[in-house]
Amino acid sequence: MNFLILALLLLALAIFPQLLKDEHLSGYVYDAKTKAPVPGACLERNGKRIFTDNAGGFCISKVSKKGEKVIIKAMGYKHKAILFTNTEDEIIVLLNRLN
């Protein structure tokens, strides 16, 4: 009986942190040629927008669907779409300048 309780407790401790995990997508947006940060780039998901900081950094919280699309736009750059796969800790997005 004690073994069963201990086994269930260990299982709960292993699973519980995964249930509380807040899925998010974070990273940086850089110029593909110069590798300079792109501050103020817009990341759009489901009609909601966030903008990169001065270092080109961003964090989108509550991303839960595998394959959820995020569109990145910045003035003077081509738009880019990325798919969230729930495996990334941090991503780097390289934007190409318009010709």
Image (cartoon, rainbow, N blue to C red):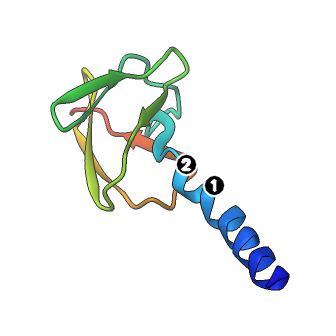
Q: Along the line of sight, which residue is nearer the eye, 54 or 15?
A: 15
User: On the picture, is 32 further left or further right than 44?
Assistant: right
Looking at the rendered structure, the secondary structure element under dot 1 is: helix
Looking at the rendered structure, the secondary structure element under dot 2 is: helix
User: On the picture, is 1 further left or further right than 74?
Assistant: right
Tell me the kind of residue under disc 2. Leu
- Label at residue 42: none
Viewport quadrant of the N terminus:
bottom right
Q: Which residue is mark 1?
A: 17
Residue furthest to the right: 2
- Are dots 1 and 2 in contact, CB under 8 Å? yes
Viewport quadrant of the C terminus:
top left
Taking the spot 50% from the left edge, 32% from the top edge, the residue there is 34
Q: Along the line of sight, which residue is nearer the eye, 14 or 43?
A: 14
- Label at residue 20: 2
Q: Is residue 7 above or below residue 26?
A: below
x then y, percent, for residue 8: 70, 75
**Distance between the Cα atoms at labels 1 and 2?**
5 Å
User: On the picture, is 24 further left or further right than 98?
Assistant: right
Tell me the kind of residue under disc 1. Pro
Q: Along the line of sight, which residue is nearer the eye, 61 or 85?
A: 61
Taking the spot 50% from the left edge, 61% from the top edge, the residue there is 87
